[in-house]
Image (spheres, rainbow, N blue to C red):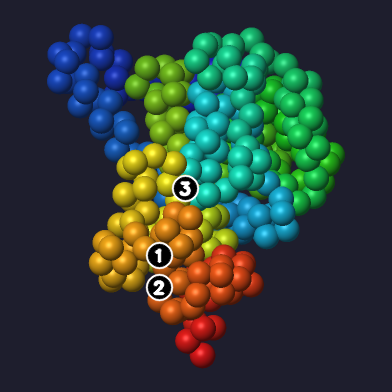
Amino acid sequence: MNIQHLNTEQRNPNTLEIDECSTIECLEKIANEDAVVAGIVRQTLPSIATVVDHVVAAFQKGGRLIYVGAGTSGRLGVLDASECPPTYGTPATMVVGIIAGGERALTSAEEGIEDDEQAGADDVARLAVGRNDVIVAIAASGRTPYALGALRSGNIAGAVTVALVCTEKSPMSKMAMHTIEAVTGPEVITGSTRMKAGTAQKLILNMISTTSMIGIGKVYSNLMVDVQPSNEKLVKRSQQIVMEATGCTAAEAQAVLRDQSGHAKTAIFQYLSGLSPEEARLQLQQHDGKLKQALQHTAR
């Protein structure tokens, strides 16, 4: 596929004269283009749901969600993966982000490495990927060699492979088991896929990780009950979560949090069930950390 045929590389007729616009006119044109992204992402929800179901199944079998990409796509994957441990109390190995060029590519452009298909395959292979893992390869163009290599390696290993792309009928879509196509069209600045395409990718990655965490019991109502209280703000958030979930006072929340070493979910269960700290921990573990199930069982 020639690059000029990619919809992400077409010139946007709505911004042909953007270099002659005032500041506010430039911003309005950017905002107008951004406004269409959410609707495009909404059209992909059935595809996202299929992927989420695979991720939940993978987590339940001890598997991993692995994001792979180059440039902006890789950075977005690493960002989403890095937010899971503090937000949901997951181990760093559960959601993994791989970017072409490694850590240095997070802050410095390492554009050449995206052309190395074998590097993508090797980076995935180094993770000892297996049948319980889900690999989401991310590329706006749907043709990045590094991402294609990652998919090839994942397929060989028997993992569930997913292409997250912003073009139709791409090489990545043909290689992956499942595809999420968010076709965002020409960018405000031709070929600058960190804009609409990047926004769509971030929305979709947020949806995949968030909904998967809900699926394995990391959320109670809409509260992040497995949050890691690793700084003062998060300590206060944990206390507020316990108060919101139980209706208890600040002093009561602090007391049960002390009993549970700051873990909000177990503190909530202890307070609502009336069990001892140790029994609350044991009962919650027996229900795989799913708070509502544990409470329903205790109520019986």
Asked which secondary structure carries label 1, the reply is helix
Residue 256 circle label: 1
Q: Nearer the viewer, residue 93 or 256?
A: 256
**In the image, residue 145 lies at what x, y percent?**
70, 22
Q: Position of residue 140 (x, y in %)?
A: 54, 29
Q: Is residue 219 left or right of residue 61?
A: left
Report the amino acid beneath label 3. Gln
Closer to us: mark 1 or mark 3? 1
Q: Say left or right for 52 vs 151.
A: left
The residue under label 2 is 271
Question: In 3D space, how far apart are the residues under numbered discs 2 and 3 (Cα atoms)?
Answer: 19 Å
Q: Quadrant of residue 200?
A: top left
Question: Residue 297 at what x, y percent from top left?
Answer: 54, 83
State the separation of the CA atoms marked 1 and 3.
16 Å
Residue type (three-letter) at the residue carrying disc 2 = Tyr
Residue at 46% across, 23% down = 193
Examine the rendering and report whether any part of residue 43 can be seen.
no
Q: At numbered mark 3, what does the secondary structure look like: helix, strand or loop?
A: loop
